[in-house]
Image (cartoon, grey):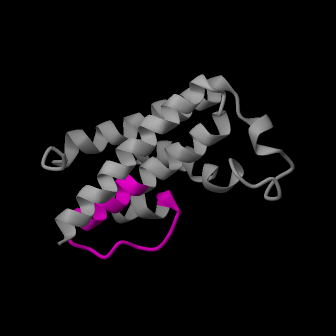
Amino acid sequence: MNKEIAIKWYKQARHDLEMAEKNISIKGYDITAFLCHQAVEKLFKALIALQGAKIPKTHYIDELGRLLDINESILSQVLDLTADYTLARYPDVHDIVPYEEYDERTAQEKVKKAKGIFYYFKKHIKLDEIK
């Protein structure tokens, strides 16, 4: 059962990452940042399910990453995406209007970091079995 759940989470994670990248072309840079966070969150939840553990009900991807015992270089990438869960969407959590804060360069960097996290886990944990 956990493998089936993991597959669903992983498929959605890949879709979110694809949509994040596509939003750059329509200047949805804030949406790109949020979807990169979502993609990594769902990837981590897929991996937790694949391990047979209960998926935590949290959006803090740094906490999820620590549960997966990720290395420090990957954790630094995760930490950069963590705040985007709220900063990219809510104008009352900071002194900014989210869509005005993000630009193309920032959005591209977020996608690059999210892809790097996916690559790390694809390389180190057998995700080949999840199609």
With 131 as the anchor, is 33 left or right in this view?
Answer: right
Q: Which residues are magenta?
A: 42-62
Seen from this angle, which residue lies furthest left?
129
Please identify the quadrant where the C terminus is shown. top left
Of residue 69 and residue 117, the one placed in the foreground of this image is 117
Viewer can see residue 11: yes
In this picture, is 3 found above or below 70? below
Magenta-span inclusion, residue 45: yes
Q: Which residue is found at the position 65% from the left and 24% from the top?
A: 104
Of residues 35 and 84, the one drawn nearer to the viewer in this rendering: 35
The residue located at (44%, 56%) in the rendering is: 41
Q: Please give the count of numbered marks on the rendered protein.
A: 0
Instruction: Where is residue 45? Give x, y as percent.
Output: 36, 62
Quarter assignment of residue 42: bottom left
Q: Is 93 covered by the magenta stretch?
A: no
Which residue is at a point 49% across and 58% down the rendered structure image?
A: 62
Q: Position of residue 109 (x, y in %)?
A: 55, 29
Q: Residue furthest right?
A: 95
Residue 73 figure quarter: top left
In this image, 15 relative to 58: left or right?
left
Residue at 17% x, 72% y: name it.
1
In the picture as drawn, the residue positioned furthest to the front comes out as: 26
Query: Residue 81: x, y in percent?
Result: 55, 46
- Quadrant in the picture for residue 30: top right
Of residue 50 and residue 17, the one placed in the foreground of this image is 17
Residue 71 visible in the picture: no
